[in-house]
Image: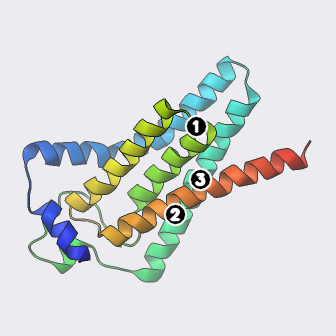
Amino acid sequence: MDIDVVKSLNTNQSSYKTNYCSFHANSVTYINLGAPLTVLTIGIIKKDKKMQQNAAYMVGSFLLSSAISNTLKNICKQKRPYEMYPEITKLSSGGGYSFPSGHTSAAFSTAASLCFYYPKWYIITPACLWATSVAVARMYQGVHYPKDIVTGAVVGVGSAWATYKFQKWMNKKHK
């Protein structure tokens, strides 16, 4: 079933979908840097220490999700769909191992951090739509299975939740 989802996405290509998915997959680095930098910059301008702290913990969440994802990749060593199935076209520069999706983990880490720190519909909706678009794009590009995506999302959200709770604990401890 895992490969059937990838096949249905990957074999039904169009230039619009390919460009859309490439844009979203490539946006991860920019958003993961830009979101905490934006929060930090606004925090500095407003002299808001809480926002500055939130930015630092967002970076921490991303680093934690990356560490977990890379560790799991090296433990599991799962080949990517395009390596296992000749009918899958590689539409990305994705290399290394497949499980879990590092792009998805990173995207959900940043999206979830934004949702935890700024729980407003106008933050939550675009953040979640963006992270989901990244996840679907990675399957369309033939570099991940659905289980890679789901696990990446769990790692990303889990990392954001853990750093959010750690920040709350640290703040309580220092009061």
Q: Secondary structure at mark 1?
A: loop
Residue 62, relative to residue 118: is it above or below? below
Q: Nearer the viewer, residue 102 or 3?
A: 3
Dividing the picture into quadrants, the one containing residue 93 is bottom left
Color encoding of the figure: rainbow
Measure how far apart labels 1 and 3 are at the Cα level: 14 Å
Q: Amino acid at mark 2?
A: Val
Q: Residue at x 49, y 63 (%)?
A: 154
Q: Residue at x 15, y 68 (%)?
A: 7
Q: Earlier in the sequence, mark 1 or mark 3?
A: 1
Q: Amino acid at mark 1?
A: Pro
**Cβ–Cβ below 8 Å for labels 1 and 2?**
no
Residue 3 location, x and y as percent? 21, 75
Q: Secondary structure at mark 3?
A: helix
Which disc number belongs to residue 160?
3
Measure how far apart labels 1 and 2 are at the Cα level: 20 Å
Give the left or right position of residue 45, taking residue 90 as reference.
right
Q: Which residue is mark 2?
A: 155
Q: Which residue is mark 1?
A: 119
